[in-house]
Image (cartoon, grey):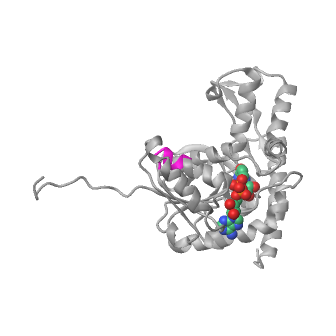
Amino acid sequence: MTQSQTFPLCNKFPKVSIIGAGNVGKTLAQKVIESNLADACLLDIVEGLPQGIALDLTQATGLEFHHRSIVGTNDYKDTVNSDVVVITAGIARKPGMTRNDLLKINAKIVTEAAQKCLVYSPNALYLVITNPLDVMTYLVWKTTNLPANKVVGMAGVLDSTRLQAFIAMELGVSFNDVQSMVLGGHGDLMLPLPRYCTISGIPITELMDTETIERLVQRTRDGGAEIVKLLKTGSAYYAPASSAFHMIESVLLNQSRLLPAAVYLQGEYGLKDIYLGVPCRLGCGGVEQIVEINLTDEERKILHNSARSVRDNIDLALEQLGMKH
Ligand code: TXD
């Protein structure tokens, strides 16, 4: 090599910081590095936990043949210059516990985590996962003062993939041929939309009777609780981590995928000043477009019911945090 030889410029690899090294956080971290999507920083309040997971994952690097690195830490400084910050920190649902029971504890954890990350990564996209999802996403937006397109919540992709799985299992068709759409808050009042579910373009209403569809819709509504009951400790994490990964990929690779996610509504669907699950386009600019689809009177009623419940909890959480609405 001579002095005059130049190397191609190495662009900085994207960085994803994940706050909370629990089941969802560590599974997501593994997906992020092993797919070569980005370097990861895994942070938790428990000393040793993120460091141990990061070391374990690092030791698998040669076998998994990827080129990304992971740091485990308890110090927010290590999250510096993240492109995406994912917040999973909090307490997971226990059997018999509703998502809203988690409200009080998680509101404090999530808002503190977001504010600490903001100091080191003011330009990142903030992806919220902690439950109750829509409320936590609103609180992150409200307490960080970030533009609404930079704060988004993950739930709709998970609820939709659950409905997709149930449809595929019922009909015995490939999961990949099923498209599904679930809107609304992440809870019992979510709005699965069978009218917008298709198998290779064929509406499911052509292939299943109403009773079957209603059964699958109900199983989707209870999708989280079904797994909590089976696991006995903790809640689902493989499909949640895959869902978050999907969204991060759309942002970092600027895929502009049309996905249901909790986004800030300013009049869309007749709703204002609330985070709720609706279809949006996700790209390198964050939430690039909110898509309004036609809803029947009944569907609109369910969406607004769901919004009312989210709104009540936002008010409660703001009160608990001593913040005026
Ligand atoms: O669709 C969705 N949005 C969801 C949401 C799907 C699945 C899980 N959902 C919720 O995500 C769940 O109800 C929880 O609120 C979060 C995280 O679920 P996970 O299953 O990962 O919970 P764990 O395993 O209990 O992990 C939580 C971690 C744990 O390691 C704690 O030590 C850590 O969060 N934690 C903190 N980290 C940093 N800072 C603080 N203050 C803190 N408090 C707890």
Q: Is residue 96 left or right of residue 177?
A: right
Q: Residue at x 75, y 37 (%)?
A: 193
Q: Position of residue 87 (x, y in %)?
A: 64, 61
Q: Nearer the viewer, residue 275 or 136?
A: 136
Q: Is residue 54 visible?
A: yes
User: Tag count in the figure?
Assistant: 0
Q: Nearer the viewer, residue 305 or 21?
A: 21
Q: Is residue 140 visible?
A: no
Q: Is residue 240 left or right of residue 314?
A: left
Q: Position of residue 192 (x, y in %)?
A: 77, 40
Outermost right residue: 96
Q: Position of residue 36 (x, y in %)?
A: 45, 46
85 is higher (above) or lower (below) than 191: below
Q: Residue at x 27, y 55 (%)?
A: 9
Q: Is residue 34 magenta?
A: yes
Quarter of the picture for ligand 1?
bottom right
Q: Nearer the viewer, residue 164 or 309?
A: 164
Q: Quadrant of residue 111?
A: bottom right
Q: Is residue 211 left or right of residue 68?
A: right
Q: Residue at x 79, y 46 (%)?
A: 190
Q: Position of residue 138 (x, y in %)?
A: 70, 64
Q: Looking at the rendering, in which quadrant would you find the C terminus?
A: bottom right
Q: Is residue 36 left or right of residue 147?
A: left
Q: Quadrant of residue 218?
A: top right
Q: Is residue 107 magenta?
A: no
Magenta-colored span: 31-37
